[in-house]
Amino acid sequence: MPVNPDLVGRVFPPTPPYLVGREKVREFARAVFAEAPQHSDVDAARNLGYADVVAPPTFAMVVQDITLQQLLAEPGSGIELSRLVHAEQRFRYTRPIVAGDELTATLTVGGIRTLGGNAMVTSDAEIVDATGAHVVTATSVLLVGEGAA
Amino acid sequence: MTELTVGDVIAERSVHLTRESLVRYAGASGDFNPIHYRDDVAVAVGLPGVLAHGMLTMGIAIGTVEQWLGDPARVLEYGVRFTRPVLVDPETGADVHVSAKIGALDDDTARIDLTVTAAATTVLGKAQVRVRRA
Protein backbone atom coordinates (compact mmCIF):
# COMPACT_ATOMS: atom_id res chain seq x y z
CA MET A 1 0.00 0.00 0.00
CA PRO A 2 1.51 3.35 -0.98
CA VAL A 3 1.75 6.24 1.46
CA ASN A 4 -1.57 8.04 1.56
CA PRO A 5 -1.06 11.50 -0.02
CA ASP A 6 -4.06 12.85 1.91
CA LEU A 7 -1.84 12.89 5.02
CA VAL A 8 -0.12 16.09 3.84
CA GLY A 9 -1.16 18.96 6.05
CA ARG A 10 -2.74 16.68 8.64
CA VAL A 11 -2.40 17.92 12.21
CA PHE A 12 -2.67 15.24 14.86
CA PRO A 13 -4.13 15.80 18.35
CA PRO A 14 -1.62 16.95 20.99
CA THR A 15 0.02 14.06 22.85
CA PRO A 16 -0.71 13.54 26.56
CA PRO A 17 1.71 15.50 28.77
CA TYR A 18 5.15 13.88 29.15
CA LEU A 19 6.76 14.63 32.52
CA VAL A 20 10.55 14.78 32.17
CA GLY A 21 12.09 12.94 35.11
CA ARG A 22 15.51 13.65 36.61
CA GLU A 23 16.58 10.01 36.51
CA LYS A 24 15.33 9.67 32.93
CA VAL A 25 17.54 12.59 31.92
CA ARG A 26 20.52 10.97 33.65
CA GLU A 27 19.77 7.61 32.01
CA PHE A 28 19.46 9.19 28.57
CA ALA A 29 22.63 11.27 29.00
CA ARG A 30 24.58 8.16 29.94
CA ALA A 31 23.18 6.29 26.92
CA VAL A 32 24.33 8.99 24.44
CA PHE A 33 27.73 9.49 26.15
CA ALA A 34 26.76 13.07 27.06
CA GLU A 35 29.33 13.83 29.72
CA ALA A 36 28.67 17.53 30.39
CA PRO A 37 27.87 17.90 34.11
CA GLN A 38 24.53 19.71 33.68
CA HIS A 39 22.97 16.42 32.50
CA SER A 40 23.58 14.57 35.75
CA ASP A 41 24.60 17.04 38.46
CA VAL A 42 21.76 19.20 39.78
CA ASP A 43 24.16 21.79 41.22
CA ALA A 44 25.99 22.11 37.92
CA ALA A 45 22.66 22.69 36.17
CA ARG A 46 21.62 25.27 38.77
CA ASN A 47 24.92 27.09 38.35
CA LEU A 48 24.00 27.51 34.68
CA GLY A 49 20.60 28.91 35.69
CA TYR A 50 18.41 25.82 35.27
CA ALA A 51 15.96 24.49 37.85
CA ASP A 52 17.14 20.89 37.46
CA VAL A 53 19.27 18.63 35.26
CA VAL A 54 19.26 19.55 31.56
CA ALA A 55 18.43 16.93 28.93
CA PRO A 56 20.88 16.38 26.05
CA PRO A 57 19.69 18.02 22.79
CA THR A 58 18.49 14.80 21.17
CA PHE A 59 16.28 13.90 24.15
CA ALA A 60 13.49 15.72 22.26
CA MET A 61 13.25 12.55 20.16
CA VAL A 62 11.74 10.69 23.12
CA VAL A 63 8.78 13.07 23.06
CA GLN A 64 8.68 13.27 19.27
CA ASP A 65 8.51 9.49 19.12
CA ILE A 66 5.06 9.58 20.75
CA THR A 67 3.86 11.56 17.73
CA LEU A 68 5.46 9.13 15.30
CA GLN A 69 3.53 6.34 17.02
CA GLN A 70 0.36 8.32 16.26
CA LEU A 71 1.38 8.44 12.61
CA LEU A 72 2.12 4.70 12.51
CA ALA A 73 -1.22 3.92 14.17
CA GLU A 74 -3.19 5.96 11.63
CA PRO A 75 -5.38 3.53 9.64
CA GLY A 76 -4.66 3.61 5.93
CA SER A 77 -1.55 5.76 6.19
CA GLY A 78 0.56 3.27 4.27
CA ILE A 79 3.39 3.89 6.74
CA GLU A 80 4.68 0.81 8.53
CA LEU A 81 7.64 0.41 10.85
CA SER A 82 9.05 -2.55 8.92
CA ARG A 83 9.42 -0.43 5.76
CA LEU A 84 10.72 2.73 7.43
CA VAL A 85 14.18 4.21 7.32
CA HIS A 86 15.01 7.34 9.30
CA ALA A 87 16.61 9.52 6.63
CA GLU A 88 17.01 12.91 8.30
CA GLN A 89 16.45 14.53 11.66
CA ARG A 90 16.47 18.18 12.70
CA PHE A 91 15.72 20.08 15.90
CA ARG A 92 15.03 23.78 16.29
CA TYR A 93 15.27 24.91 19.90
CA THR A 94 13.84 27.79 21.87
CA ARG A 95 15.36 26.38 25.06
CA PRO A 96 16.78 23.11 26.39
CA ILE A 97 14.50 20.51 27.99
CA VAL A 98 14.88 20.43 31.78
CA ALA A 99 13.76 17.81 34.33
CA GLY A 100 10.35 18.79 35.64
CA ASP A 101 9.11 19.98 32.24
CA GLU A 102 5.69 18.73 31.24
CA LEU A 103 5.83 18.52 27.46
CA THR A 104 3.14 18.13 24.83
CA ALA A 105 3.83 17.47 21.16
CA THR A 106 1.68 18.22 18.14
CA LEU A 107 2.50 16.48 14.87
CA THR A 108 1.97 18.02 11.46
CA VAL A 109 2.69 16.09 8.29
CA GLY A 110 4.56 18.65 6.21
CA GLY A 111 5.10 16.90 2.93
CA ILE A 112 5.31 13.64 1.04
CA ARG A 113 7.65 13.28 -1.89
CA THR A 114 7.58 10.11 -3.96
CA LEU A 115 10.74 8.76 -5.55
CA GLY A 116 10.06 5.70 -7.63
CA GLY A 117 8.28 3.30 -5.29
CA ASN A 118 9.55 5.09 -2.20
CA ALA A 119 8.08 8.02 -0.33
CA MET A 120 9.88 10.63 1.76
CA VAL A 121 7.57 11.78 4.53
CA THR A 122 8.49 14.98 6.39
CA SER A 123 6.80 15.62 9.71
CA ASP A 124 7.19 18.30 12.36
CA ALA A 125 6.50 17.74 16.05
CA GLU A 126 6.08 21.02 17.85
CA ILE A 127 6.90 20.51 21.52
CA VAL A 128 5.60 22.99 24.08
CA ASP A 129 5.75 23.17 27.88
CA ALA A 130 2.90 23.28 30.41
CA THR A 131 2.43 27.01 29.81
CA GLY A 132 2.12 26.44 26.06
CA ALA A 133 5.50 28.06 25.36
CA HIS A 134 7.59 26.61 22.53
CA VAL A 135 10.52 24.43 23.60
CA VAL A 136 11.67 22.61 20.46
CA THR A 137 10.39 21.57 17.07
CA ALA A 138 11.57 18.15 15.95
CA THR A 139 11.49 17.39 12.23
CA SER A 140 11.91 13.89 10.83
CA VAL A 141 12.24 12.76 7.27
CA LEU A 142 11.19 9.14 6.98
CA LEU A 143 11.87 7.06 3.91
CA VAL A 144 9.03 4.62 3.41
CA GLY A 145 10.04 1.79 1.11
CA GLU A 146 7.89 -0.03 -1.37
CA GLY A 147 6.61 -3.20 0.23
CA ALA A 148 4.27 -6.11 -0.28
CA ALA A 149 2.21 -4.83 2.65
CA MET B 1 34.92 32.52 22.42
CA THR B 2 36.15 35.90 21.23
CA GLU B 3 38.41 34.70 18.43
CA LEU B 4 36.72 32.17 16.18
CA THR B 5 37.87 31.34 12.69
CA VAL B 6 36.17 29.25 10.06
CA GLY B 7 37.98 25.92 9.90
CA ASP B 8 38.99 25.84 13.57
CA VAL B 9 38.60 22.37 15.07
CA ILE B 10 36.92 23.03 18.41
CA ALA B 11 36.47 19.48 19.73
CA GLU B 12 37.09 15.85 18.84
CA ARG B 13 36.42 12.50 20.45
CA SER B 14 36.06 8.79 19.81
CA VAL B 15 33.36 6.68 21.41
CA HIS B 16 33.56 2.90 21.54
CA LEU B 17 30.18 1.25 21.04
CA THR B 18 29.33 -2.29 22.03
CA ARG B 19 26.08 -4.23 21.80
CA GLU B 20 25.51 -3.23 25.41
CA SER B 21 25.62 0.44 24.32
CA LEU B 22 22.80 -0.27 21.87
CA VAL B 23 20.66 -2.04 24.44
CA ARG B 24 21.26 0.84 26.86
CA TYR B 25 20.18 3.38 24.22
CA ALA B 26 17.13 1.27 23.33
CA GLY B 27 16.02 1.35 26.96
CA ALA B 28 16.77 5.03 27.49
CA SER B 29 15.10 6.19 24.27
CA GLY B 30 12.27 3.68 23.95
CA ASP B 31 13.40 2.67 20.45
CA PHE B 32 13.23 -1.11 20.56
CA ASN B 33 13.50 -1.78 16.83
CA PRO B 34 15.14 -5.26 16.86
CA ILE B 35 17.60 -4.38 14.05
CA HIS B 36 19.57 -2.70 16.84
CA TYR B 37 20.07 -5.85 18.93
CA ARG B 38 19.12 -8.98 16.95
CA ASP B 39 21.38 -10.25 14.18
CA ASP B 40 18.71 -12.57 12.79
CA VAL B 41 16.22 -9.74 12.34
CA ALA B 42 18.87 -7.42 10.87
CA VAL B 43 19.88 -10.04 8.31
CA ALA B 44 16.26 -10.88 7.50
CA VAL B 45 15.59 -7.27 6.45
CA GLY B 46 18.70 -7.22 4.27
CA LEU B 47 21.18 -5.48 6.55
CA PRO B 48 24.76 -6.69 6.95
CA GLY B 49 24.26 -6.94 10.73
CA VAL B 50 23.11 -5.12 13.85
CA LEU B 51 23.32 -1.32 13.49
CA ALA B 52 23.59 1.50 15.98
CA HIS B 53 20.47 3.67 16.24
CA GLY B 54 20.94 6.71 14.01
CA MET B 55 19.70 8.81 16.91
CA LEU B 56 22.44 7.37 19.12
CA THR B 57 25.08 8.46 16.62
CA MET B 58 23.40 11.86 16.37
CA GLY B 59 23.44 12.20 20.16
CA ILE B 60 27.10 11.17 20.44
CA ALA B 61 28.02 13.68 17.74
CA ILE B 62 26.60 16.75 19.48
CA GLY B 63 27.85 15.57 22.87
CA THR B 64 31.33 16.24 21.53
CA VAL B 65 30.83 20.02 21.58
CA GLU B 66 28.86 20.43 24.81
CA GLN B 67 31.82 21.19 27.07
CA TRP B 68 33.05 23.73 24.53
CA LEU B 69 29.59 25.35 24.44
CA GLY B 70 29.13 25.69 28.20
CA ASP B 71 25.52 26.86 28.37
CA PRO B 72 23.30 24.33 26.52
CA ALA B 73 20.88 27.16 25.64
CA ARG B 74 23.34 28.28 22.98
CA VAL B 75 22.19 25.43 20.72
CA LEU B 76 19.64 26.86 18.28
CA GLU B 77 19.40 24.15 15.65
CA TYR B 78 20.84 20.72 15.03
CA GLY B 79 20.31 18.55 11.99
CA VAL B 80 21.78 15.47 10.32
CA ARG B 81 21.20 13.10 7.45
CA PHE B 82 21.66 9.42 8.18
CA THR B 83 23.76 8.46 5.19
CA ARG B 84 25.59 5.25 6.22
CA PRO B 85 24.91 2.73 8.99
CA VAL B 86 27.24 2.10 11.94
CA LEU B 87 27.67 -1.67 12.14
CA VAL B 88 28.34 -2.90 15.66
CA ASP B 89 30.17 -6.21 15.77
CA PRO B 90 29.06 -8.53 18.63
CA GLU B 91 32.67 -9.04 19.74
CA THR B 92 34.66 -5.99 18.65
CA GLY B 93 31.91 -3.34 18.67
CA ALA B 94 32.49 -0.15 16.68
CA ASP B 95 34.40 3.09 17.10
CA VAL B 96 32.64 6.33 16.25
CA HIS B 97 34.91 9.31 15.72
CA VAL B 98 33.59 12.87 15.83
CA SER B 99 35.42 16.00 14.76
CA ALA B 100 33.76 19.41 15.20
CA LYS B 101 34.90 22.48 13.37
CA ILE B 102 33.62 25.98 12.73
CA GLY B 103 31.87 25.86 9.37
CA ALA B 104 30.52 29.41 9.11
CA LEU B 105 30.22 32.54 11.20
CA ASP B 106 28.00 35.57 11.28
CA ASP B 107 27.55 38.31 13.86
CA ASP B 108 25.24 36.36 16.16
CA THR B 109 25.66 32.69 15.32
CA ALA B 110 28.22 30.07 14.41
CA ARG B 111 27.69 26.93 12.40
CA ILE B 112 29.55 23.91 13.69
CA ASP B 113 30.14 21.15 11.16
CA LEU B 114 30.44 17.66 12.62
CA THR B 115 32.36 15.00 10.74
CA VAL B 116 31.29 11.62 12.05
CA THR B 117 33.02 8.45 10.90
CA ALA B 118 32.98 4.75 11.72
CA ALA B 119 35.14 2.11 10.04
CA ALA B 120 36.76 4.93 8.00
CA THR B 121 33.38 5.86 6.47
CA THR B 122 31.43 9.07 7.01
CA VAL B 123 28.11 8.03 8.53
CA LEU B 124 26.24 11.34 8.96
CA GLY B 125 25.70 13.85 6.18
CA LYS B 126 25.32 17.59 6.66
CA ALA B 127 25.66 17.22 10.42
CA GLN B 128 25.43 20.85 11.48
CA VAL B 129 24.78 22.65 14.75
CA ARG B 130 23.84 26.30 14.71
CA VAL B 131 24.77 28.00 17.97
CA ARG B 132 24.48 31.44 19.45
CA ARG B 133 27.88 33.09 19.76
CA ALA B 134 28.79 33.65 23.37
Image (spheres, rainbow, N blue to C red):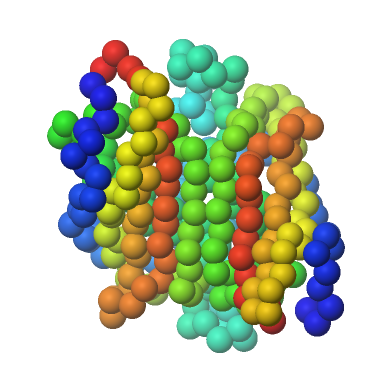
Q: Compared to A18, does A71 lie above or below?
A: above
Above or below, B51 relative to A105: above
Q: Is residue B112 visible?
A: yes
| Residue beneath the point at 61% across and 31% down | B85
Residue B1 picture location, percent across and down = 78, 79
In which quadrant of the rendered view does residue B2 lie? bottom right
Q: Position of residue A36 (x, y in %)?
A: 67, 67
Question: Can you name the residue that lies furthest to the left here?
Answer: A75
Residue drawn at 57 percent across, 25 percent down: B50
Q: Quadrant of the C terminus of chain A?
A: top left
* B86 to the left or right of B36: right
**Quadrant of the rendered structure where residue B88 is?**
top right
- In this rendering, the answer to whether B15 lies above or below A46 is above
Give left or right: position of B112 versus B7.
left
Percent x, y of residue A75: 15, 34
Number of labels in the image equals 0
Taking the spot 63% from the left edge, 41% from the top edge, the residue there is B124
Residue A22 visible to an observer of this rendering: no
Quadrant location of residue A114? top left
Question: Where does the N terminus of chain A fall, quadrant-wise?
Answer: top left
Q: Using the image as rendered, state which of residue A102 and residue B20 is in the foreground.
A: A102
Residue A109 is situated, as x and y percent measured from the top left of the image, at 29, 48
Residue appearing at x 41%, y 71% in the figure = A135
